[in-house]
Image (spheres, helix red, strand yellow):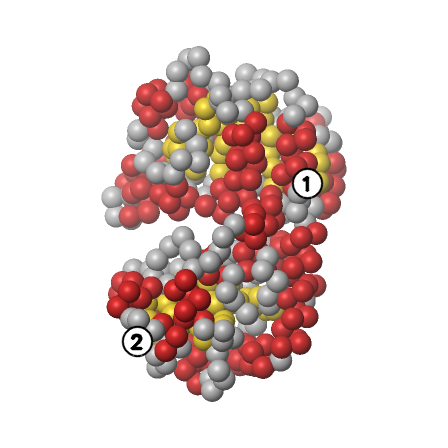
């Protein structure tokens, strides 16, 4: 009797979910007229099916990669690039849910077709799979769309999830989550980041699971192998202790700008704010009392070493800039916008400072526990910590070594996934 009630509840919740998707789609079209980001979200989906029809033929062999946004894209990229080498005659379709991923990567050559993922309706899922007819599907981290997964399972298309992480609070592990647990059965295999995730899945009788770690470690380790030199940063740094502040928001600026303005140490600062719109950049520059140069102004100055602060008002070079850091501060954690990538600076074996809000970011949680990432909760704690890191070279080296060891110890997630894929026959 209990099983019948739970099954009925699952069907009801699945029905409600489908109704809500249609309602959400309706209201999104209205709100999109007044919101730029949602406008991109809605407008970009209007041409997806036509794009797929134009660029994929019935005879093409296709591998489909899906990511939510830019962060998940970076996670999946090592596997995507490896599969492109392994299957050079396949077409690769890359989909994004969020504009913050698609708008950045829509013109890249990382895949043959790059589009938004249409909303998760039964009709959209059928049409999408009809046009792409993939032989292999890879979802990254948190993407669980019931209708797409149901369609994939129905068509017996080999589907895996990588760099996935589960928490007890998720619907899969609630008594009313049967309809979502059913979605997980569409995955032939799930590669999780940690033992907790594996145990949670095993508790609901899902056993096709492997602890592979996070593919982002492979991605950041690749950074060490490339040429990270930037002549203008080298000229600015001029062999001086340098603090790099990456992806900062207003809440982060409130704690580091007073330190920069009041510090008497022989130290330089590079700031790469999250928002690079000109009014915000100018406001940031005006708030700093020390000599400051913008990336966009660098050609106007023969001697960049004369400046104390360098503001990066462009995108795409932060990972290279981190290679010049002696100390890094990663933004997003002082407010509620979400902590940015701590692994990118950590891979260079330097201390990393973050704000107080880092729960849910596993690598940050791990490194805070180990002592390689240092969390501050106020202007005072930030100033005391940064002052010590600037002046105490031995302390700085000790903290940086923790990060170096952690990143290297967690590599090779992609190899485990590729070893599994080499043994399947569908592709």
**Residue 138's mark?**
none
Image height check: is 25 above or below 425? below
Secondary element at image label 1: loop
* Spot occupied by residue 204 in the image (x, y as percentages of width and height): 71, 34
**Residue 212's mark?**
1
232 horizontally vs 188: left or right: left
107 horizontally vs 341: left or right: left
Secondary element at image label 2: helix
Residue at 41% in and 69% down: 235
351 horizontally vs 151: left or right: right
Q: Quadrant of residue 369?
A: bottom right
Q: Name the one closer to the observer, 255 or 118.
A: 255
* Spot occupied by residue 60 in the image (x, y as percentages of width and height): 44, 16
Can you identify the residue that label 2 sits on? Answer: 286
* Spot occupied by residue 388 in the image (x, y as percentages of width and height): 59, 80
* Spot occupied by residue 197 in the image (x, y as percentages of width and height): 69, 43
Residue at 29% in and 48% down: 35
């Amino acid at each position: 009797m209990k099983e019948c009630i739970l099954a009925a509840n699952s069907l009801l919740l699945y029905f409600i979910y489908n109704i809500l998707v249609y309602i959400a789609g309706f209201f999104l079209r209205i709100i999109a007229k007044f919101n730029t980001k949602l406008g991109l979200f809605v407008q970009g989906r209007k041409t997806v099916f036509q794009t797929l029809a134009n660029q994929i033929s019935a005879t093409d062999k296709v591998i489909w990669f899906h990511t939510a946004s830019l962060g998940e894209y970076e996670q999946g990229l090592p596997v995507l690039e490896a599969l492109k080498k392994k299957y050079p005659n396949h077409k690769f379709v890359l989909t994004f849910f969020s504009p913050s991923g698609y708008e950045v990567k829509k013109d890249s050559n990382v895949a043959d077709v790059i589009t938004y993922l249409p909303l998760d309706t039964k009709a959209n899922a059928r049409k999408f799979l009809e046009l792409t007819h993939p032989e292999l599907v890879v979802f990254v981290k948190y993407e669980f769309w019931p209708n797409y997964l149901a369609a994939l399972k129905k068509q017996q298309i080999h589907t895996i999830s990588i760099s996935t992480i589960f928490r007890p609070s998720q619907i899969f592990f609630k008594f009313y989550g049967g309809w979502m647990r059913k979605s997980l059965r569409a995955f032939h295999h799930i590669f999780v980041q940690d033992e907790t995730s594996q145990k949670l899945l095993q508790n609901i009788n899902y056993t096709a699971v492997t602890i592979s770690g996070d593919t982002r470690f492979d991605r950041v380790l690749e950074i060490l192998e490339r040429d990270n030199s930037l002549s203008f940063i080298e000229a600015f740094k001029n062999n001086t202790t340098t603090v790099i502040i990456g992806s900062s928001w207003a809440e982060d600026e409130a704690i580091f700008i007073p330190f920069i303005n009041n510090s008497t140490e022989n130290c330089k600062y590079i700031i790469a704010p999250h928002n690079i719109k000109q009014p915000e950049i100018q406001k940031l520059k005006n708030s700093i009392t020390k000599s400051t140069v913008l990336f966009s102004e660098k050609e106007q100055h023969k001697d960049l070493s004369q400046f104390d602060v360098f503001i990066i008002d462009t995108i795409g070079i932060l990972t290279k800039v981190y290679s010049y850091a002696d100390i890094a501060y990663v933004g997003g954690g002082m407010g509620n916008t979400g902590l940015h990538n701590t692994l990118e600076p950590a891979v260079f074996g330097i201390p990393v400072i973050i704000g107080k809000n880092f729960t849910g970011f596993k690598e940050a949680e791990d490194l805070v526990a180990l002592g390689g990432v240092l969390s501050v909760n106020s202007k005072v704690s930030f100033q005391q910590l940064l002052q010590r890191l600037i002046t105490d070279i031995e302390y700085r080296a000790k903290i940086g070594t923790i990060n170096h060891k952690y990143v290297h110890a967690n590599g090779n997630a992609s190899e485990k996934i590729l070893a599994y894929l080499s043994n399947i026959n569908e592709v």
